[in-house]
Image (cartoon, rainbow, N blue to C red):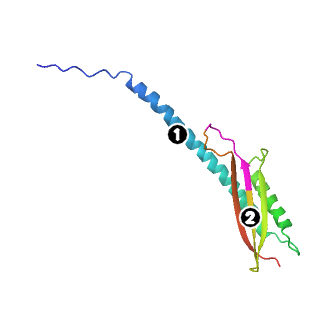
Amino acid sequence: MIRRPSARPRRGAAAVEFLVTVPLFVAVMLGALELCMVVERSDRIRRAADVGAQVGGATVETAPVTGSIIEAEAEDAAEAALTALGIDCTGGCTVDATWSADGGTGLYTVEVVITAPYTAVSTLDWIPGTLTRSATVLSASQS
């Protein structure tokens, strides 16, 4: 009877595989969590911009319409929405509203742009330091 040499013992192989795969798995999961946090905060900022643009589009300004009251109302509404949505703007959020009349069409637009800082939880380099979102509303002329 011919005896084959036994295979090399695999003692500790499972521990080595575990030590190799767990850090990779944890890194992927932390990256996914960070991405979810960025998307969620970006969505809150977009919703605040939507609220500001909608309020600006519904604001009535007495003649002559310059857009200054509309822009101020849109900015105030967006800032209030940021606070209501839990966005802390102590780090320097900027809210800019722009009103523009659209030629002879009888329409005007209100655009609200919000830029807010984002501090990453992880050390990933691809996470943006600021998030910018905007919303635009087209509304009937007030003349």
Q: Which x, y percent locates residue 44?
A: 68, 53
Q: Seen in the image, is 39 located left or right of residue 49?
A: left
- Disc number placed over residue 28 in the picture, else none: 1
Q: Seen in the image, is 120 located left or right of residue 62?
A: left
Depth-wise, is mark 1 or mark 2 nearer the camera? 2
Queried whether the magenta region covers residue 77, the answer comes back as no
Q: Is the residue 84 above or below the residue 62 in the image?
A: above
68 and 25: which is toward the camera: 68
> Which residue in the protein does label 2 denote?
111
Main SS class of the magenta portion in the image: loop
Residue 60 found in image quarter: bottom right
Which residues lie in the magenta part?
A: 114-123
> How many discs appear?
2
Q: Residues within 10 Å of mark 1 (few under 14, many from 20)?
A: few
Label 2 element class: strand
Outermost residue toward the left in this view: 1
First in residue order: circle 1 vs circle 2: 1
- Residue type at mark 1: give it: Val
Q: Seen in the image, is 11 located left or right of residue 47?
A: left
Residue 53 found in image quarter: bottom right
Q: Is the residue 109 above or below the residue 143 in the image?
A: above
Q: Residue at x 78, y 70 (%)?
A: 100
- Disc number placed over residue 102 in the picture, else none: none
Can see residue 85? no
90 and 98: which is toward the camera: 98
Residue 111 found in image quarter: bottom right
